[in-house]
Image (cartoon, coloured by chain):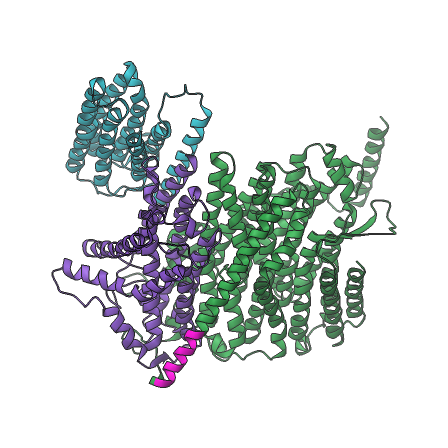
Chain colours: A green, B cyan, C purple
Amino acid sequence: MELFGLSLAFYLLGALASLAFAGRETANHLGPAGAVAGSLVGLAGLALTPASAVAQASLPWGLPLGSLALGLDPASRLFLLPVYAVGAAAAVAGSLALAGSEAAQAGPDRRGTHWFFFNILLAGLALVMAARDGVVFLIAWEVMSLAPFFLGSLHDDEAEVREAAWTYLVCAHLGAALVIAFFALAMGQAGATGFAALAEAARAGRLTMPSLLFFLAFFGFAAKIGLVPFHVWLPAIYPAAPGHVAALMSGGMINVGLYGLWRALEILPPPAAWQGWTIAGLGVASALLGILAALGQGNLKRLLAYSSVENMGLICLGLGLGLVGLACGNPAMAALGLGGALFHMLCHAGFKSLLFLCAAEVLTAVGSARIAHLGGLAKRMPAVGTLFLLAGAGIAGLPPLPGFIGELTMALAMLAGLDLPGLLPRTASAASLAALAAVGGFALAAFAKAGGLAFLGAPRTPAAAKAEAPSHAALLAPLFLAAGLVTAAALAPALLRFVGQAVLAFPGMDPAPARAALEQAAMAARTVGFFGAGIILLAGGLLWLRARAGAAHGRRREPTWGCGYTAPTARMQYGAASFVEPAAKLLAGPMGLTRRLDMDPGLFPKRATLFVVSRDAARDRLFTPLFEAVARLCDAAKVVQHGKVHLYILYVLATVVLLLAWKLS
Amino acid sequence: MAAIQSLLVALVVVNLAYLAVTRLKTLTRITALQGVLLAATPLAIAGPHGHGLILSLAVLAIKGIGFPWLVARTLSRLEVNPVVEPYFGFNMSLLAGVGGLLFSLWLESRLPFPPGLFPPLLFPAALTSIFSGLTLVVARRKALTQVIGYLAAENGIFLLGVPLAAQGSVWLELSVLLDVFVAVFVMGIALHHINKTFESIDVGRFCSLRD
Amino acid sequence: MNAWLHILAALVLAPLIPGIINRVKARMSGRVGKPLLQTYFDLAKLTRKGLVESHTASFMLGVGPAVSLAAVCGALCLLPSPASPAPASFGGDFMLAAYCLGLSRLALILAALDTGSSFEGMGASREAAFSALAEPVLFLALLALAVDAPSLSLSGMLGQGLSGALAPERLFVPLLLFILLLTENCRIPVDDPNTHLELTMIHEVMVLDHSGPDMAMISYGAALKLWFFAAAVTLSLLPVQAMPPLAAWAAFLAGVALVAVAVGLIESSMARLRLLRVPRLLGSAGALAALSLVLTVWR
């Protein structure tokens, strides 16, 4: 708890220092330094306390409402881990990326405020996860929700970036409104603001309308998690934000929605099975639609954003199944579902922030993140290419990387779900395993596309051909994350037990069978670990044999076989749109792909152009019409805003009279 | 017991096959197959004697041979495009078929049947037959597929009646009568008229008939 | 020891399966055909050749085949031998096997994209799309086996035999695994493995620019993958667990050979489907798998 406080202090110091030195190069050193120091201290705090410990602290609080109650328990620690790890890596990467870059540009140096908000975001995230009081939670939530708006709009001279930042702000606040409504309702009914008191009231049955509370919490936090259809901000803000910010948001911030949902479920009365199925159902929908949309994207960062939607969907699937297990008295399913979800959350945080940092290096080297402008980068930046390909395989859940363990644990929960009473729950468990398999298959396709087309093959543009490898320092942050992930793979059973502490602390969990189920999963993870080591050794041996064969029998370079065509160009390679064509023939609707062919008429057209556009259906069909309707309504309401001051005074007077009459009658 | 279970599973598969098939000719063959399987059910339930045998032979003659032959003859006379034209895709139809099976299994657990009335899986098999028949009617474009859809649905109703046949129920006669009605009326007259009037048997064109 | 015997058998005998298939095809068309051991000869020749790499390629071209072969070997380690459980097994290990095959596929796709050839890119894109569709079918089929199995590992699920006539829907599982064999190994009716060129549209297209030891690893990996599925089909059909070891081995090997013959017969008697029809084939297989699963769960 002390180290937690110290890390918070470092964040705040970093924030203030970067504000104080705004406009100077120093801000670009002090801000990240604060973030790194805070994160490392936080990580040390996590490492030094036993995983199951529960700490509480109450501090003086100047507000009439609530109390400054903070605490750390297994769930808080678990969710803090990616915040600290990704926070440190993103700060280092950002500091290097922004070093001197603004000096070359005209205009004011905004790095001071940037690092201020970066540190504030980290502090807000840490505070959200330590808050033990509804009011503190909401304040921290608001701080944490606002900071990315300023972080994401670093390059706000571009219209696209401004629009993306606004999209984020609107989504974040629609979600926040529901979260505030949830807490206000719960706190009003319970007559207290502390989490413990709220849970007490729920157990005593004083929270009426638990279903309404559940939906408020679920939809409110789902907006942060980025479940379909609330995901529209992800593909907007991630491509627009600088790489290190996108890494922090995808690795550290997006999980806070899961954390909020976790806390809300702890506070609410024991979950009913339908609540679990609701979460799992929306999770499956997000996972499938997310990965299909990812497959359809032509922009590397947008692809990664949709992949986040997919992974968050998978996590919610695990969470939902865990709740179903809890509600139906199947502790193995409960423990494995929740445990798998949390483990997958950690893996996703690591892999996704690593991918975003790699994408940022690509953007720096080539100047574009569109796959149509990339290609052949693995030859020019081999470290980044290797990391991206490995992280892509990892996020697709392939063994021996740790992403597999999370999916395996969730699959074990689904297998345990085959023992549920009733035909429909069993079938639903089986169907979710089939959905997991389909998502896995499409994730493989999506990352084969992202990695294969961006880093392999021939460069598609002169810029890609001239790309230069990043400096060794720039690889520091990605390598730090990669090292963390390799450790996670090697120590997967231990990590699973660490995750298990949070699962066992979930209210209503039957500890003995839950522990047994998690232990079984940990043993499976151990087997997978040995297995993975075997595969790596075997592949290494085969490569050694190959090298020997090459040395013995000669090795030479020739052009790629061009099907008899002697003048191939790089543009003839398979591109982003052509790679997904077989899938798009079948699934163009869910993938959001539309195509338009412009061709000169006649039998021998001189010119033909094919556009393949991937649009977001939720944005185009749901939110745009909705907000346009709201805008029309607001326009209509402008009649009362006419600029005549004396009439404004009349409004005030009328309001006062009406209020008095209503209140005193 | 084993024989009836195999028959019923085969019937369920046939119901899914209705939705997966792309050729009209295959569709008629599947109708024949369903007829033959249906003819075997009274034998499997009641044994090869008495009412069961007669019923079985009658069903084989009408549903296994008669109707498919009629449909095939019409098909060859109409000279239409031999491909089933779906309103919504084959994989979606199959998904709907599996959903229908799930629903009917669930429904069976909810309905208060007297125990022992239906052998296991008979009710779901019959209900899925009705569902896939109606799916053919709703989701396919050609009038011929609609006729086959009605036949499939009617076969489902007949299957429900088989266990009751021992008690000499009127269900069965009614359903056989309905068969004849469908066969004679729709097949013989309507299709030819449709083809003559619209120069196609695409039911989508019927909308030009509305006021 | 007994557990590793199956791995050894697979490693030694797998190249025989393409030989059997080719021999059946040749006989069906009235030719004598290649020797049964042709794949062994090819492998021996390829390993003695030098490496020719594309100018465009990076490290992935060489890494791909090695990783692919290693991953297929990994998947084989999870398959039970006819007379004893697999060397490594745990509840849910079929997921590891399926994902190992996924890793092998990803490695080959990336190696294909590494050459920058549009033809190989085409093969890679089709492989990615079709196997993504095949994945849920595989899981559904295995789940139908898992529902009644004594344990949820492949060793517990396979080798039980078909449990009686009372549950006829169980019969579909071997059939589904056979369809998946054809899909995953790119045989007719999904793909035509006969030529390296125009007729072939998926797997063989992806490996055009590989040579020498790389090609050997790919061919050997393909043979092992074929063995994996043939063994899975056989084990899902035969109750080898209840047989004495020698009889189990004999039945198993005969079963694998028969599966190979069946593949050969199908290839001689059917044409390749249009690519558009492949998803429909997989959809039907998926519906059958779902049907089998639902009925198994319901009973």
Is residue A545 or residue C67 the one in the foreground? A545
Is residue B186 or residue A586 the one in the foreground? A586
Q: Main secondary structure of the magenta part?
A: helix
Q: Which residues are magenta?
A: A541-552
Q: Is residue C113 magenta?
A: no
Is residue A610 or residue A331 the one in the foreground? A331
Q: Specify the quadrant that holds the N terminus of chain A.
A: bottom right
| Residue B169 visible (yes or no) | no
Residue C69 in the image: state x and y as whole percent. 39, 67
Residue B172 in the image: state x and y as whole percent. 27, 18
- Quadrant for residue C226, please give it: bottom left
Q: Is residue A606 toward the left or the right of residue A395 in the image?
A: left
Q: Is residue A133 toward the left or the right of residue A464 in the image?
A: right
Residue A306 in the image: state x and y as whole percent. 53, 57
| Residue A650 visible (yes or no) | yes
Position of B98 relative to A55 (above/below) = above
Q: Is residue A548 magenta?
A: yes
